[in-house]
Amino acid sequence: MSPKICKMLDTILNHRSIRNYKNDPVSQPVLDEILMAGIRASTTGNMQVYSIIVTSDPIQKEKLWEVHFKQNMVLQSPLILTFCADFHRFNSWCRQRRADPGYNNFLSFFTAAIDALLVAQNCALAAEANGLGICYLGTTTYNADKIIEILQLPESVVPITTLVLGYPADNPELTDRLPAEAVVHLEKYRDYKANDIDRLYAEKESLPLTSRLLEENGLETLAQIFTERRYTRKDNEFFSGKFLEVIRKQGFMDS
Ligand SMILES: Cc1cc2nc3c(=O)[nH]c(=O)nc-3n(C[C@H](O)[C@H](O)[C@H](O)COP(=O)(O)O)c2cc1C
């Protein structure tokens, strides 16, 4: 394996989310390289139906911190990248060139969201290859309406995900993953029997972190931590409704 590929895999296989950052700024050449790596990602029909909003201004950061559920790392990290599904620019180009854009529908929203996510992950890897740490913020979709206001996103633009970036102030352990056989299917989907589920989740369930979480939360199983604490039905239904409304308001459900 070439040293370049070896380094790339090393970056990928050593990924861990960083939630504590040093004060050090990210230099413009490093940021430019991260953004270029994002822009090099595959993109549907080479349309590039995404935008990246770069935030480093402390006032803007504080506004974003509020709507990202006050997660500390938003204030701590020097740089925040918000990745948006964006048909606004493409629609403008079409109209200026006597072309009638038919992109005010859910399929186009989903297409642009896929584009935005591919860009985000390329940026994440480029950042990590430069010695930076990253963490995604799922709170982007929860409070997309407020992020639209803060970042002044026009019609046909919806924030999809956010990365905080900076030099790591800690080096957490690698987190666990399910074994490959849990997520890879050969030729056809092979459904899971009860004993497959038991086997595939056994390692995760026996981690010291799991015992700690169960004790702290007074719950019986790790699955209940997800359903009763982290991602509850009530929250999921509430934020689903809110996000659907955002997609509609931004003009992606008109046809
Ligand atoms: C779309 C997405 C949203 C996430 N949102 C958050 C978040 O809001 N806060 C947080 O601390 N971590 C967030 N994470 C990080 C995950 O919790 C983390 O990737 C996962 O626990 C695995 O840990 P690792 O990245 O260190 O391997 C998010 C990850 C993804 C992919």
Image (cartoon, rainbow, N blue to C red):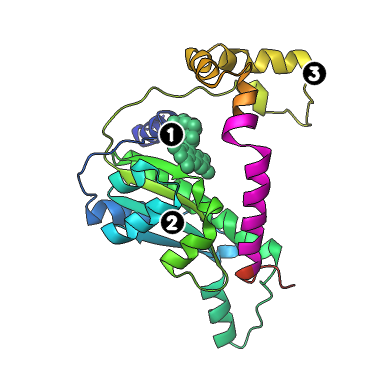
Mark 2 residue type: Thr
Query: What residue type is disc 3 on?
Result: Lys
> Pointer 3: residues within 10 angstroms few (<14), some, or many (20+)?
few
The residue tagged 1 is 12
**Which badge, 3 or 1, is on the more N-terminal residue?**
1
Relative height, residue 202 to residue 181 (above, below): above
x and y percentages locating residue 102 in the rendered image: 69, 75
Please tell me which of labels 2 and 3 falls first in the chain. Answer: 2
Q: Quick one: label 1 or label 2, which is nearer the N terminus? A: 1
The residue that disc 2 covers is 82
Look at 48% across and 15% down and name the residue there.
212
Measured as percent of width and height from the top left, residue 10 is found at: 39, 30
Q: Residue furthest left?
A: 24
- Residue closer to the observer: 231 or 203: 231
Q: Please, what is the three-letter code of the amino acid marked with disc 1? A: Ile
The span from disc 1 to disc 2 (Cα, nearest Å) is: 21 Å
Q: Main secondary structure of the magenta part?
A: helix
Task: Name the front one of labels 1 and 2.
Answer: 2
Start and end of the magenta stretch? 227-248
User: Which marked residue is nearer to the observer: mark 3 or mark 1?
Assistant: 3
Query: How many numbered markers are drawn?
Result: 3
Magenta segment includes 244: yes
Residue 213: where, in percent of width, then height? 51, 20
Q: Residue at x 53, y 17 (%)?
A: 210
Q: CA distance from mark 3 to mark 1?
A: 31 Å
Which residue is found at the position 29% from the left and 54% from the top?
Answer: 31
Mark 1: give few (<14), some (14-19) or many (20+) Cα within 10 Å: some
Q: Which residue is mark 3?
A: 193
Q: On the picture, is 183 further left or further right than 187?
A: left
Q: Would residue 73 appear left or right of 24 to someone viewing this image?
A: right
